[in-house]
Image (cartoon, helix red, strand yellow):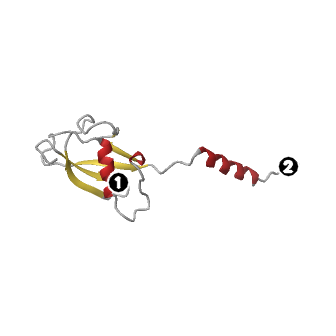
Amino acid sequence: MAGEDSIELKFRLFDGTDIGPSKYDPSTTVASLKEIILARWPQGKEIAPRTINDVKLINAGRILENNHTLAESRVPVGELPGGVITMHVVVHPPQIDKNKEKQLANTSNQNRCSCTIL
């Protein structure tokens, strides 16, 4: 993976800590990078992704798509001699499913108090 055209990346987490830097081939997919991030995720973090779908990678203000390679995502290859590209990692916590959301709404409606002003 560490050829002439390899890309050196580090991943900046939400709290400012980094994973990497490491070198990757331009043909590496974004989904593969996310799997690497999950495997290297620091232990003891309060917020941690469970699957690659919980992770968004942002480079130069754009969210990278899972099925694209680094080259297809327009990550600069060979343009930063000796430079490291920092990608931001955003973790989306799991969403509450619709059934639980309705149950929460129903219980909050039952505990309502109504007042009448005469």
Give the residue at the far left of this rendering: 4
* Residue on which disc 1 sits: 38
Q: Position of residue 30 (x, y in %)?
A: 30, 42
Which of 47/60 is in front?
47
Determine whether, in the image, residue 80 is placed left or right of residue 114: left
| Quadrant assignment, res 64 | top left
Answer with mark 1 or mark 2, whichever residue precedes in sequence: 1
Regarding residue 59, the answer to whether it shows in the image is no
Q: Residue at x 42, y 53 (%)?
A: 50
The residue wearing badge 2 is 117
Given contact means CB atoms under 8 Å apart, are the residues at marks 1 and 2 in contact? no
In the displayed image of the protein, which residue is found farthest to the bottom? 44
Amino acid at the residue labelled 1: Leu
Image-based side of 106 in relation to 43, left or right: right
- Classify mark 2: helix, strand or loop: loop
Question: Where does the image place residue 117, in percent across and percent down from the top left?
Answer: 85, 49
Q: Secondary structure at mark 1?
A: helix
Question: In which quarter of the view is residue 62 placed?
Answer: top left
| Residue type highlighted by circle 2 | Ile
Q: Which mark is residue 46?
A: none
Q: Position of residue 47 (x, y in %)?
A: 43, 58
Label 1 to label 2: alpha-carbon separation: 57 Å
10 Å crowding of disc 2: few (<14), some (14-19), many (20+): few
